[in-house]
Image (cartoon, rainbow, N blue to C red):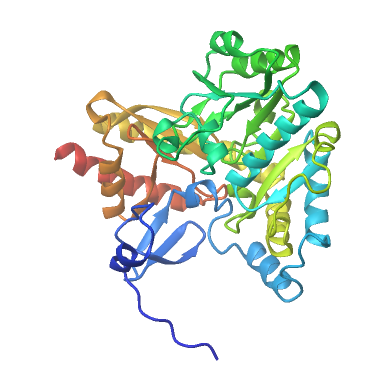
Amino acid sequence: MSAPHTPVERADFDQVIVPTFAPAAFIPVRGQGSRVWDQSGRELIDFTGGIAVNVLGHAHPALVAALTDQAGKLWHISNIFTNEPALRLAKKLTAATFADRAFFCNSGAEANEAAFKLARRYAHDTHGPEKSEIISAVNSFHGRTLFTVTVGGQPKYSDGFGPKIQGISHVPYNDLDALAATISDKTCAVVLEPIQGESGVLPAHQAYLEGARKLCDKHNALLIFDEVQTGMGRTGELFAYMNYGVTPDILTNAKSLGGGFPIGLMLATDEIAAHFSVGTHGTTYGGNPLACAVAEAVVDIVNTPEVLNGVKARHERFKRGLLEIGQRHGLFSQVRGMGMLIGCVLDDAWKGRAREIFDAAEREALMILQAGPDVIRLAPSLIIEEADIAEGLARFERAAAKLSQA
């Protein structure tokens, strides 16, 4: 019999947790579908999806069953051995995408770390050590390791940690001329998010991704798509690149893949993956049976016409309701994004005040997100029920009304 839990409260966070985050004033303790309950028993509607992670909501029975079943069999075996869930998951992901090979890790940052290292190793082996430069976009976000945070185009996250990794440059997003002016035969990779997530839910233009693909081909550079946030059904296709018909050389994913259980993924072709030979890269926990069993259940559910078409329909429902609220109360007049990754761009009078809207929504028992100070971001479950959408939008309406009156 386990010992009783020690009572904890929100104030404990400020005493015992490293202060890298400033969490909300309440503590969620239970979730079911798109509803969450806090310590006091208050019910909230969840439009955050754990920041695009809880792809099937909270406590989805198929994921609970997959985890419970695997927990009774094998948790960890190390990479001295392989395991059945990892092999099944890899076969399903490669069968559904451009890729031939999968690499599993534990997070989006680790997936991008692997992608950037692989791109440099591939260029080193095939073209020589001079071909090592990486180009990414201004305001991009690719993770928090020293390599990935340097590739990310936001100095506020990368400054202050000593010398940065060299050979990385940043160009404005959706500016093909700027990319063309910067890429050269020393470029080993161009790294792009098909939709910039953290910096404001900004989708790439069709011509931009097509042009990036052509420039990479011209200069023998790899095109890497960071789909950590956009992948696994989030945009209404299994991966966002499928909306554009532009195929990358390497793709990364995490967040939604595990439905809440930590797992990261890098996909690549045979030709490129071969340059990660035995010993060149690794991970202790990556591809563990627990994570892969849950992720396999996620893929089986998400990669179906019913769910993917449902994501597109839900997007239209959200967009219509959000635009009505935004225009009625003068908060925002633009709603952008794809599928269940939605950004409400604040009007001039509300620029910089996304946190106020976040707080007002929480007071109405609605969980939402920010993407910078000027955009409200929503990333709910792909299968959120109509009743929860309607009630969540009604709560958002109340929050907006109170803010605009104040």
Q: Which residue sits at x=70%, y=66%? A: 66
Q: Quadrant of the N terminus?
A: bottom right
Residue 246: x %, y % from top left: 70, 23
Say which quarter of the image contains residue 356: top left
Q: Residue furthest bottom?
A: 1
Residue 372: x %, y % from top left: 37, 35
Q: Quadrant of the C terminus?
A: top left
Please name whichever residue, 263 or 201, is drawn nearer the observer in this view of the structure. Answer: 263
Please name whichever residue, 8 or 359, is drawn nearer the observer in this view of the structure. Answer: 8
Say which quarter of the image contains residue 45: bottom left
Q: Which residue sits at x=75%, y=71%? A: 74
- Note whether residue 238 is visible: no
Residue 258: x %, y % from top left: 63, 54
| Total numbered badges shown on the rendered structure | 0
**Residue 63 in the figure: left or right of residue 166:** right
Q: Which residue sits at x=73%, y=68%? A: 76
**Residue 332 in the figure: left or right of residue 133:** left
Residue 60: x %, y % from top left: 59, 62
Q: Is residue 268 above or below residue 399?
A: above
Q: Which residue sits at x=85%, y=35%? A: 270
Say which quarter of the image contains residue 275: top right
Q: Is residue 257 above or below residue 9?
A: above
Q: Is residue 50 above or below residue 354?
A: below
- Note whether residue 46 is visible: yes
**Residue 291 in the figure: left or right of residue 48:** right
Q: Is residue 22 above or below residue 142?
A: below
